[in-house]
Amino acid sequence: DGGITQSPKYLFRKEGQNVTLSCEQNLNHDAMYWYRQDPGQGLRLIYYSQIVNDFQKGDIAEGYSVSREKKESFPLTVTSAQKNPTAFYLCASSINPGVKKLFFGSGTQLSVL
Amino acid sequence: DQQVKQNSPSLSVQEGRISILNCDYTNSMFDYFLWYKKYPAEGPTFLISISSIKDKNEDGRFTVFLNKSAKHLSLHIVPSQPGDSAVYFCAQGGSEKLVFGKGTKLTVNP
């Protein structure tokens, strides 16, 4: 089955630690996105990538980093510079950057110990 | 500036009745709108979309209406079912990304 796989489902971060959230898609989509959801908030864009080896900052990129070395993979690193990392993180993809219909993964809940 | 606003954080309806979820936007330059449904601890799933060349789009129990002059769209669910209980997000297609509203939590009571 084609889709987007996010792992792990739950992740805990210690003070000063960097953690990486995995996102893999087998839909052969060009564009991939990372969103963050906080309680009572909408989805806010962290980073997006329209093509392999290229990515752009979204609205709340500070404290995060990404890479896009392969078409199917778009990992997100939450660095120690992100002071409020507790949130639900969603990875999404679209067939190409011009198509705004996104397909989402099932999300990763990140919490701070 | 591109903003999408869902001013009702929650809505409660009886099973079998109509649910109406509302959404307002500020930027008329972008003409494609989507509704997503989200259950707790899961990713959003696409529900229905509309582009500005139409003022209505229907898919089964779900209908989206677009009022361009008022910069307003609404999602109608008829009849509402308990399984429709979820958070519904309105989104507008921007130049490079989707911009989402904060969502409306719909509860359908049996």
Image (cartoon, coloured by chain):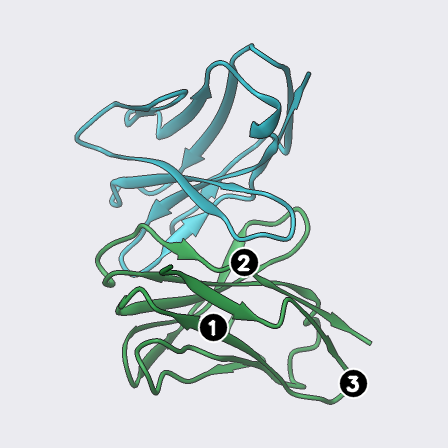
Chain colours: A green, B cyan
Q: Amino acid at mark 1?
A: Cys
Which residue carries the number 3 mark? A15
| Direction from residue A76 to residue A48 in the image, left or right | left
Q: Residue most toward the front?
A: A1
Local SS, label 2 = loop
| Labels 1 and 3 positioned on one and the same chain | yes
Q: In whole angstroms, how far apart are the C-alphas of marks 1 and 3?
A: 23 Å
The structure residue drawn at horizontal position 24% and vertical position 44%, both measured from the top left corner, is: B29
Chain identity of mark 1: A
Which residue carries the number 2 mark? A106
Above or below residue B73? Residue A91 is below
| Direction from residue A86 to residue A77 in the image, left or right | left
Q: Which mark is residue A23?
A: 1
Task: Give the mark, 2 or 3, whose residue is nearer the N terminus.
Answer: 3
Can residue A59 be seen from the camera position used here? no
Q: Which is in the foreground here, disc 2 or disc 3?
A: 2
Above or below residue B48? Residue A54 is below
Q: Amino acid at mark 2?
A: Ser
Chain identity of mark 3: A
Q: Residue most toward the top?
A: B17
